[in-house]
Image (cartoon, rainbow, N blue to C red):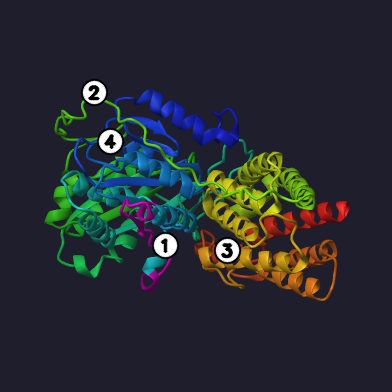
Amino acid sequence: MTRVFNDPARFAEDMVQGFTAAHPEHVRAVPGGVVRAHRPGIAKVAVLTGGGSGHYPAFCGVVGKGFADGSVIGNVFTSPSAAQAYSVAAEAETGAGVLFMFGNYAGDVMNFGQAAQRLTADGIPARCFAVTDDIASAPTAEAARRRGIAGGFTVYKTASAAAEEGADLDAVIRIAEHTNARTRSLGVAFAGCTLPGQREPLFTVPEGKLGLGLGIHGEPGVSETELTTAEDLARTLVEGLLAERPEEAADSRRVAVLLNGLGATKYEELYVLWASVARLLDEAGLELVRPEVGELVTSLDMAGCSLTVTWLDDELERLWLAPADTPAFRRGEVAPQDPSASGTVAAPRTVTAVTAQTSDVPATGEAVATGATVVRAFQAAHTLLHEQEETLGRLDAVAGDGDHGRGMCKGVDAALAAAEKAQVRGAAPAALLGAAGDAWAAEAGGTSGALWGAALRAFGSALPADRAPVPAELAAGARAALEAVTALGKAEPGDKTLVDALAPFVTAFGERLAAGSAPARALADAADVARTAAEATAELRPKLGRARPLAERSIGTPDPGATSLALVLGTVADTVSAVA
């Protein structure tokens, strides 16, 4: 289990502090992550890797010349926020554009996508690329829905090498697409990992079994099979990947191969396995080009491993073999540091934070009083979510990565602080909710962080800026929140997400207000509807997010996002009723 930490909620921040102190010649800390210690002296595409922490050396360990220009670092197993991604990109870009690279997970797609949009609007060309190498997470016909696991290492390396050679943004993206199309991975787990501060692992594997098709965020395998010999395991991995050989690589014999340890599998074990893997690949007529055996993309202390094969052509082979110098990965001799940048650390750039736009129009006394009720509701939600953190995490661990409770706590902590600050300024509910939403999204990260942030901001934006809202405006705010969530997350009722609780809540709330119910009564009734809807998600199969590959395992367990939403709505209703 993960034993060395101070405050579990600050595990990622403390890790970054130690990482940058250990490698000052390679990296420096910036808000949201790390960038190269020395900014390149000429304009080049800034390749930024990113995702949740817990995967070292991915992603920050490969920041350096010949590899990534920076890394955006989220909480453990949680995608970083759009604000963090924007911040790191602003520090790393040198005038040729930015490419965010990450695994194909909903939170990463959502948050990096928002950051890229904002950068582009600010005049910095920015694009995103999601790696999809995990063959266990979706069938061949749905390859675009596959997760990114250790194959991202190869994709990041070739794209970064192309950028280092001076390729423009479109060319770097082409290399990423080309490498990803020729990369396949398959992994197995022998035991689950344990989040910092937690007593139990996210999942267990029965003695003598292994989980086939794991995820790197603590997700269990999609199936279980017998754990026998290293030879049998090697054959399972190799045959699984060779069966997925890309059509475009039918004539390719030269391959880049990664045998990746997940965190607790010893190097000696990996070498025992590699002996069989290398022989089987050779018998299949493949030539291995600088294979890598070791820890490349881990999952905290998970016991397990994955095998990745990338079918090379001349261009990809050159980029795979190109020199690199980073804290965790070195290859060949890199060119000397550009004289214009040597020995200097680039001055920090001014990064405009995403903050709520509070109105300068003075709020009425009634609006200030209503804002005080909103703050009390956030306080009640804060208490509730901290009490339910472990329960929500266990729900999420059934078919996901177990980080939902911790993410909700970080979000509500930030939202409450922002709301209280806005209250001191005498803000009306509109500005108060907007500030809380922006803070929630910026600090929580992940899918839920982005969705809750968007919902709160949309709700606030629909309310009057200088007075307390009337019932019709409250109903409009609820509808705006739902529209923001569905537009951002693309979920619909039945997909087993928080939308399954939010949509019926919004409908019930609007109907009861339209029928003449007092807002407090309408809120209480609608919260009951949301609770029932959240409980009913237990019978649904997830169609989106990290739980989708483990859909069968999810049946019988309610969706954690819908559950946490219903819990919060219930406690908010109780708070409002108490002061009505």
Q: Nearer the viewer, residue 517 or 412?
A: 517
The residue that mark 4 highlights is: 64
| Whole-number angstrom distance, CA of label 4 to CA of label 3 | 37 Å
Q: Amino acid at mark 1?
A: Ala
Chain part drawn in magenta? 119-142
Judge left or right: residue 336 versus residue 16: left
Q: Amino acid at mark 3?
A: Val
Q: Amino acid at mark 4?
A: Gly
The residue that mark 2 highlights is: 343
The residue that mark 1 highlights is: 136
Question: In front: mark 1 or mark 3?
Answer: 3
| Whole-number angstrom distance, CA of label 4 to CA of label 2 | 15 Å
Question: In front: mark 4 or mark 2?
Answer: 2
| Whole-number angstrom distance, CA of label 3 to CA of label 2 | 46 Å
Q: Earlier in the sequence, mark 4 or mark 2?
A: 4
How many other residues sit within 10 Å of disc 2, few (<14), some (14-19) or many (≥20)?
few
The picture quadrant where one finds residue 472 is bottom right
Q: Secondary structure at mark 2?
A: loop
Question: In front: mark 4 or mark 3?
Answer: 3
Q: Earlier in the sequence, mark 1 or mark 2?
A: 1
How many other residues sit within 10 Å of disc 1, few (<14), some (14-19) or many (≥20)?
many
Question: In front: mark 1 or mark 2?
Answer: 2
Q: Amino acid at mark 2?
A: Gly
